[in-house]
Image (tube, rainbow, N blue to C red):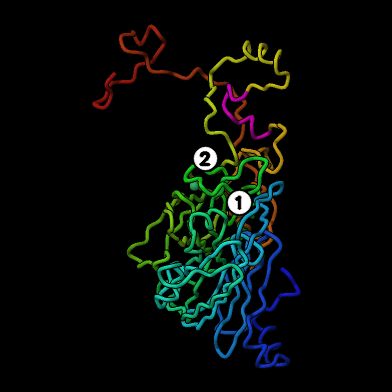
Amino acid sequence: MNRRNFFGGAAMTAVAAASVSRVAMAALPEPVLMDKPDTAPPLHPGSGRPYNPVVTLNGWTLPWRMNNGVKEFHLVAEPVVREIAPGMRATLWGYNGQSPGPTIEVVEGDRLRIFVTNKLPEHTTMHWHGQRLPNGMDGVGGLTQPQIAPGKTFVYEFVARRPGSFMYHPHADEMTQMAMGMMGFWVTHPKAKHPLITEVQRDFCFLLNAFDIEPGSSTPKINTMLDFNLWTWNSRAFPGIDSLNVRKGDRVRIRIGNLTMTNHPIHLHGHEFVVTGSDGGPWPLAARAPEVTTDIAVGQMRQIELIADEEGDWAFHCHKSHHTMNPMGHNVPTMIGVEQRDLLKKIQKLVPDYMVMGDKGMADMGEMEMPLPDNTLPMMTGTGPYGPLEMGGMFTTLKVRKTQKTGDYSDPGWYTQPTGTQAYEWNGGLDEPQRAPTAGTDPAAVGFTAVKPTTHNHL
Ligand SMILES: [Cu+2]
């Protein structure tokens, strides 16, 4: 965080009361900027109503100031450089130094004033997705307000009327501005105990987004509709996405919003979870059921909750297998089972560096040391304690540890399985597997031990 511009809740109130004149207090809150893509620790409120803060995966929460009982935030729309994962940086548009912008956390009933300054080369607006607010604060350029021209600042004022998980994004040249990374998370905490909102020990949030950036370049192709090559969580791709680190027994909430152009079935290993709410608010108990995967459609938000009672490093990812890959060619023919060796000799006479790919599958890609163009990521990457993970994109892990301290979000490293609890290689003898005979063959003649026919056996 930029220290020069840092004003947390309590610090801000003290400064405002002690030394700042009424004129200065009436001016804009100085924008707080972030220069790193790391997961920031939770920002505990120093002023206003108390709440349990969220942790934004590879993101941060925007500090505010209190001004005569109104919470004031300042968002600056601007070009940013975002590290997608170590080795690749993207030229995006975002807010306050990053894409996505900072998470805004408020409490039900809070009176809000949000300054939005446009430092982009074109106009923009801000739409507060899912909020109950006066129509003129809804941020749809041309419909509810004039556009915010470059260099101008607009003010949005409303009361946070209902608790839940929301997001913000422009409603101006939307296709371009969202494809460039303009979005952010919003959490409205309940002001008191709520019958449908459980207290949790860990509360994570992130947005699903996607970019199409040609290897060797850094600016997204904004006209892409479906064929994106970077599937990201908060503009980070595996192995750039931090793990979600929790203590065994914690109740964990994960809030997810989808601002891509397709749906994402989000899947967690080793635990069941319940969808407890969406941008529509907390769900009635009768609408909740145990799941291990939940589909999040475009423009939707889901809150999932689980008790993290199984120790280990549990994969947490989008179940569309192409979304756990980094840049790849989708037009490459499948070569499984194709004998390429004779062809290889002929090609290598012309192109000595030519490599045969994928005659046994694509797993070799996970450890292949191929020269890449500048500024892109390997298609399958990441290394775990037992070798290449062969993943990319929308993939990370939920790390559950007995030893993780309350309030500690740091990465505990890789899990060591207790002796006797890991899959192992079989070194004993193996009989030839029995296979069903083809029709018209005498089972005895091919060594097949006939199973006594039952009503379900049509052999
Ligand atoms: Cu997906």
Determine which residue is flagged by label 2: 322
Determine which residue is flagged by label 1: 312
Relative to 269, is 136 above or below? below
In which quadrant of the rendered view does residue 301 lie?
bottom left
Which residue is nearer to you in this view: 338 or 81? 81
Horizontal side, residue 102 vs residue 370: left or right: left
> Which residue is most to the left?
455
Looking at marks 2 and 1 on the same chain, the residue that comes earlier in the sequence is marked by 1
Q: Write the residue at 68% across / 92% down.
A: 17
Amino acid type of the residue that numbered disc 1 sits on in the rendered structure:
Gly
Q: Is residue 94 magenta?
A: no
Magenta part of the protein: which range? 357-367
Q: Looking at the image, is mark 2 or mark 1 nearer the viewer?
A: 2
Q: Dot 1, how many residues are within 10 Å of its Cα: few (below 14), some (14-19), or many (20+)? A: some
Q: x%, y% of residue 454?
A: 26, 25
Relative to 170, is 414 above or below? above
Which residue is nearer to you in this view: 262 or 270? 262
Check residue 370 in the rendering and tell me which mark sits there, or answer none: none
Q: x%, y% of residue 299?
A: 43, 58
Q: CA distance from mark 2 to mark 1?
A: 25 Å
Q: Dot 2, how many residues are within 10 Å of its Cα: few (below 14), some (14-19), or many (20+)? A: some
Tag 1 secondary structure: strand
CB of mark 2 near ligand 1 (< 8 Å): yes
Relative to 198, is 239 above or below? above
Q: Does any portion of residue 394 appear in the rendered image?
A: no
Q: Write the residue at 71% across / 46% down.
A: 87
Q: Quadrant of the C terminus?
A: top left
